[in-house]
Amino acid sequence: MTEEKKEAPTSASAGAAGAQVAPTLESVDAAEAKRAPRGGITRRGLFIGVGSTVALLGLGGLRYAGHNPLNRPPGGTDEAHLVSGCIRCERCYEACPRQAIVPAKIEDGLLGMRSPMLDFNTGNYCDFCYEENGGNPLCVAVCPTAALELPATYTVGNPETGETGDIIIGTAEIDPRTCLAYRMTGCRDCYDACNYGAIELKDEGGANPIPYVVEDKCNGCGACQAACLSLSSGSIKSSERAIVVRPVEA
């Protein structure tokens, strides 16, 4: 019988066997994924999440963490209640017969993003669904979480008789620096659009009547803002219309 000779390992092969391969990012992630409980988060995922949040806040500071004042649909003036209760289901957008409800954007604030707001600059306004539902807002009726919520009893407004009602969205405000009527144009579009007598005219019978807001008659429906043509004038440099609705908070 011949005796098999076993060769001693060379220094090169021994070194290769004993060498430790430096871990890669992929191998570390794989190992952590095995150790992490189902549905858990790895350290790398945690760092990425924290870093992304810090970066986002750095873009706009507290403006992105909170939000700018927004005109909310009926029943949404309690801001904390609305933002915490809204599930972004979009049912209120779909229910609005005037298409005046739109989702808030990120520049309106991170916490309120995609929550419902009223945009009167599109030519639409809120008549509280008077024609469709007798002045009882459909957006409130379809809200599944009561994020939009009205008091148990309230008086319905009536645009035909000029009764304002108890549902207040905001109050209109005129900027005389950009209002066309203040430039002797004879414009009275906001006055003609208001069904509640909340806008009256100084020197109504004169050549150039000037509109002003009667605050205790204004429910913030936005018809005046929707009708305002100030931005159509090339001589006016402004980011908003001459008459805008400022929101109220509960």
Image (cartoon, grey):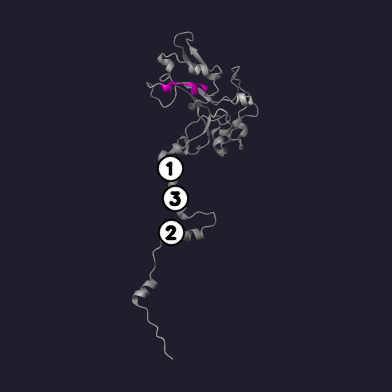
Q: Give me the disc on residue 185.
A: none
Main secondary structure type of the part rendered in magenta: helix
Q: Which secondary structure lies at badge 2?
A: helix
- Quadrant where the N terminus sits is bottom left
Q: Where is residue 116 in the image (x, y as percent from the top left)?
A: 53, 34
Query: Dot 3 corresponds to which residue?
Result: 48
Q: Distance between the residues labelled 2 and 3?
A: 15 Å
State the residue at coordinates (49%, 27%).
122
Q: Of helix, strand and loop, which one carries label 1? A: helix
**Kind of residue sitting beneath label 2:** Glu
Q: How far apart are marks 3 and 1 (CA)?
A: 12 Å
The C terminus lies in quadrant: top right
Instruction: Pinpoint residue 95: horizontal percent, then vertical percent.
Output: 59, 32
CB under 8 Å between discs 2 and 3: no
What residue did someone put label 2 on?
Answer: 26
Q: Residue furthest left?
A: 11
Amino acid at circle 3: Ile
Q: Viewed as shown, does residue 209 lie left or right of 126?
A: left
The percent position of residue 172, horizontal first and vertical second, equals: 50, 22
Residue 17 position in % (x across, y down): 39, 73
Look at mark 1 in the image and give the residue it sits on.
Answer: 56
Please state the extent of the stretch shown in magenta in the rendering.
223-232
